[in-house]
Amino acid sequence: MKENTRAQTPKRGAVFCLKVLLFITLFLLFFGFFAPGFPQIMVFSRTAGITMTTFVVLEIILMVVYGGYAVGKKKSKEIIPPLCIAVFITDIVTFLQLYIMSISRWPRAELVWLNLATLLFVFILQVLAVILFVYLGNFVYFKLNPPEDCIIICDCDADALQLAAHIKRYRKQYRLTRIVSYKDPELKPLIRHNDAVFIFNVPPAQKAAIIEYAYKHYTNIYVQTDVADVMLNTAKFELMDDMSVLHLPVTELSFEQRFVKRAMDLLVSGIATIILSPLMLVIALAIKLDDHGPVFFKQQRATKDGRIFKVYKYRTMKVHEPGEEFSATENDDRITRVGRILRKFRVDEIPQVLNILKGDMSLVGPRPEMLENVYRYTQELPEFEYRLRVKAGLTGLAQVAGKYNTSPKDKLILDLMYIERYSIWQDIMLLLRTLIVFFKSEESTQGFSAPNQPDVTLVKHEEKMKEPAQK
């Protein structure tokens, strides 16, 4: 049943209190265990003030970057790794600051190892605290907030099966009651008696009418994103005399933005090349010893304005004849033994730091697709070429928020959101959030499903949808 905002305030307050308690627990664990070795943090001192302020400010910033205490919105397993990364970075920075400000001479080796052991022990306790508070938070949230009754409004049932499968993954948030056509005469009563509506593949005029009606009756609205929606979302509100208009300026990086972006590319990729060089050598030897083939895989890709360049990757597949180059599928027998390990730990793309140094790519931007895919996707979706308005990137919003097998349209939407909302701060956030990719489940980075194989989940869901809806 629908609830007004005032009725939900105590429920939101409970989650806020848990968030504050988690923050205080992380703070006390860090400074509580380091207090015996650094007594100056227990008194009013410059060291205490600066390090505690650093911990608080950095933890808040990193929690924002990594999605925060998103209980009720995400599954517990999706919340825990980003929070742990935020805590780890905060601990390291605060520890180094505390250590530098607290020593007057080079400390004894055994004392250094003791402090590092303490830091590891504190981090383990903090991870346990994060796990406890996340599971507790989701438990409390869903005890106080029953799942929303929702319907999918679409052109036909087949179009909505994919969306229904996604909704099904979030049973605690949503209870799907029906899939209904936008032409259904009972549509308006259904909108009024459900908490939320998902609008999928509905013609623009009818979509606007449904949105207006749902808004009028306090029903939550979820709309499938189109390219035009991305543009309107970034438009600027302006007044021409007394007439309201939305201004969509042509997106182009300023000279200052291009300069800072290129400087950051050179700095980060240069440092990464130096730090990762031992690992790169080990990987190269492993590939060579595995099947004696070439270490690197080079392939033509497209970057800004359609310029073609050769991307560098560690070879993870068997050497094949020209014309056999197509995206990997699940359990692809072309992938080598070493290649499976490289793909599992997401390190096969390390050589692309060389592309960044050369200027072919940037650290952040739309991923460069195979030319065959670009031609095919552009034929099916002409707007796909809009991704070439900026330089291709090693990571991007589509890589952080999406999956390997995310549909071309959804990749395009994510890439356009990055392009239209571009800022240096967004680049920094995406670089930090890229660490989350290493903690994603296997399904997030697997290859495309082999062709002509039915999706069992969707088939079962379709059969379930044919049953009489119950509420």
Image (cartoon, rainbow, N blue to C red):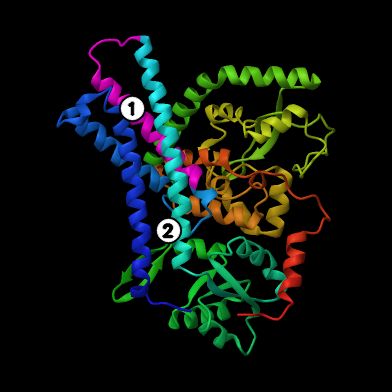
As drawn, is 406 to the left or to the right of 57?
right
State whether the magenta stretch is mostly helix, strand or loop. Answer: helix
Rendered location of residue 221, percent (x, y): 50, 72
The residue where tag 2 is placed is 249
User: What span is in magenta?
Assistant: 80-108
* Front-lying residue, 63 or 11: 11
Residue 238 appears in which quarter of the rendering?
Answer: bottom left
Q: Which residue appears farthest toward the left when viewing the image? A: 44
Looking at the image, tell me whether mark 1 or mark 2 is earlier in sequence order: 1
Q: Residues under labels 1 and 2: Cα distance? A: 45 Å
The image's mark for residue 95 is 1
Work out whether 153 lies above or below 144.
Answer: below
The residue under the point 64% across, 85% down is: 183
Residue 407 appears in which quarter of the rendering?
Answer: bottom right
**Can you see residue 351?**
yes
As drawn, is 337 to the left or to the right of 277?
right
Mark in the foreground, 1 or 2 = 1
Magenta residue check for 94: yes
Magenta residue check for 254: no
- Image label count: 2
> SS at mark 2?
loop
